[in-house]
Amino acid sequence: MKMMEILRILYSKNEILGAKVISEELKKRGYSLGERAVRYHMHILDERGLTEKVGYKGRKITDEGIEELKKGLIYDQVDFTYSHFQEKMYNVDLDPETGKGSVIVNISSINELDSTALINKMFEKGLSVSNRYHIYEHKNKTYIETVCGTTIDGVLQHNGIISKLMYGGLLKVEDYVPINFTEQIAYSKTSITPLEAFTSSDNTSILDVVTSGTGVIPANFRIIPAVKKEQTIKLLQKLNKININGVITIGEPGKPVLGIPVPEGMIGIAIIGGVTPLCAAQEAGYDLSVKLADSYSEYSKMVSSSHEMKTPLKPATAKNNHQISFILNKISNLISQVNFDEETGEGEVITNISYIDREYLDESLEILNKIYKSKPEYCIGNRYSIIDYPDNKIGLGTICSLTVDGILINKGITVTPEYSGVLDVYGNNRRFIELISYMGSSIDPHEIFLKKNMEDILGSLNNSGKILASVHSIPYIARDKTINVLESLKESGFEVLKLGKPNEYMYNARIEKYNFGFVLSGGLNPIAAIKEKDIPVDIKSIETIVDFNSFEEL
């Protein structure tokens, strides 16, 4: 998914660029891709004839690359993330008996060497998968490798234990007791690594866990066959002896683990994120560029921090299994309450409500008006709502695109919200550069993209930016009726970006066989534009049901 950005950088700069410059440019665009990863992607682009290596200077885009840029790359699909981890786990050959063999490592650039002291403290406190690491120099830059938690899955699989990586997310800890996952994303059907989506200084509070035992840490969740529990425990004990641990808790057959449901006949295992020490350094303000499960390293050659691997976390209890809420459940209930009638223009719609200080209201409304007037297709409905809020705050309501799903369902049409994504706008060409499935996510993915500044609404006004959008699917039998309903919705300002055909890729998003899809702009796009103007805004999506007539037309 990053290859389009690399091609765009080469095209816009119109010069030969090296991996370092491209990595820096990608960072400006919201992508954390180190030089090594850039070179890997460039090698693929070279093989496809889209870029050309020019001596030791770097690469330039070819005529084929420019043509592909205009058409949009369609071969890199959202299944890549999960298959990437499967490949990594398959290639792990660590021997738990000897401590020799390859392990999966996370790689981070270190721009401030004194950050290693804090990273070592995480090893000392046991908030890591392993206390071993590797620091090396490459082209005048320092990197650190830490052991990734999926190494454990690789060891399990090589010993005949099927380990299925399910979720990555944030785990709440109170007084050193793991309570429950507060947010998570499924590893299947996503273009962005789940932990990468959550690993930012305003998501985790690892340093608070160190000092007080209460905070939020990154963690992964997988399931294994219940009949393999005893063998798994023995293997984990062997791994612990060679300083690989990080296991937070192991569940019972068919019982939820830290709020995540587990299928019958399976048991759940939660393991601390291998990037935890690196995220702690980010929390402290150090500048690190983290790449998850990026490579392999020979474990026996990694340096030991000399601290014993002993987690500070206490055992989780059954009382802590508060069932986590999945976003699709909330979506289904809100969709079921939509009763908007496009013929009368009356009824209730799903609303996003975001909050700003009252002093910014006039400026914010000017931005909303600019977006609605210049690019109405990037919005859902040309309306907004002002909602009074205490403490000198104002709520700004925008219509959520899922309202369209509710309207269609009321017409007897089955609709499934499939993906939330970032849609790249480049002239007349559009393609998704990130997609996260609603299935298995506890949070609207658009909120994740906004936190990571991956959108560029203001740039899209000049046909070179990124907007929030979503993908929905419908059984093909209902296509004619759907077209009629969507056509009638235009008068109320509900625009559809693209209506697909069966087996068609819509802006690089794939729809299941015997279904067709359509793409809607995100209702948060106007609010995201306010954020881009450096106005402090607390963005909340898919909040509630509101009467359509309470909205004012711009």
Image (cartoon, rainbow, N blue to C red):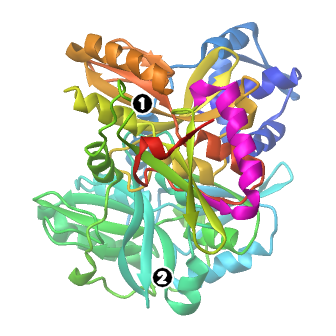
Q: Residue 475, image x and y in percent? A: 23, 21
Q: Are marks 2 and 1 in contact (CB under 8 Å)?
A: no
Q: Residue at x 31, y 41 (%)?
A: 338
Query: On the image, numbered disc 1 is attached to which residue?
Result: 471
Asked if 188 appears above or below 501 in the picture, the reply is below
Quadrant of the rendered image containing residue 48: top right
Q: How many marks?
A: 2
The residue at which mark 2 appears reads as 309
At horizontal 68% and vertical 20% (from top left) the residue drawn is 46
Asked if residue 165 is positioned above or below residue 348 in the image, the reply reads below
216 or 99, which lies in front?
216
The quadrant the C terminus occupies is: top right
- The residue lying toward the viewer, choosing from 125 and 535, is 535
Q: Residues within 10 Å of mark 1 (few under 14, many from 20)?
A: many
Secondary structure of the residue carrying tag 1 is strand
Amino acid identity at mark 1: Val
The residue range painted magenta reads 355-378
Residue type at mark 2 is: Met
Looking at the image, is mark 2 or mark 1 nearer the viewer? Answer: 1
Is residue 42 in view?
no
Can residue 464 be seen from the camera position used here?
yes
Q: Quadrant of the N terminus?
A: top right
In terms of secondary structure, what is the magenta stretch mainly?
helix
Q: Is residue 121 left or right of residue 82?
A: right
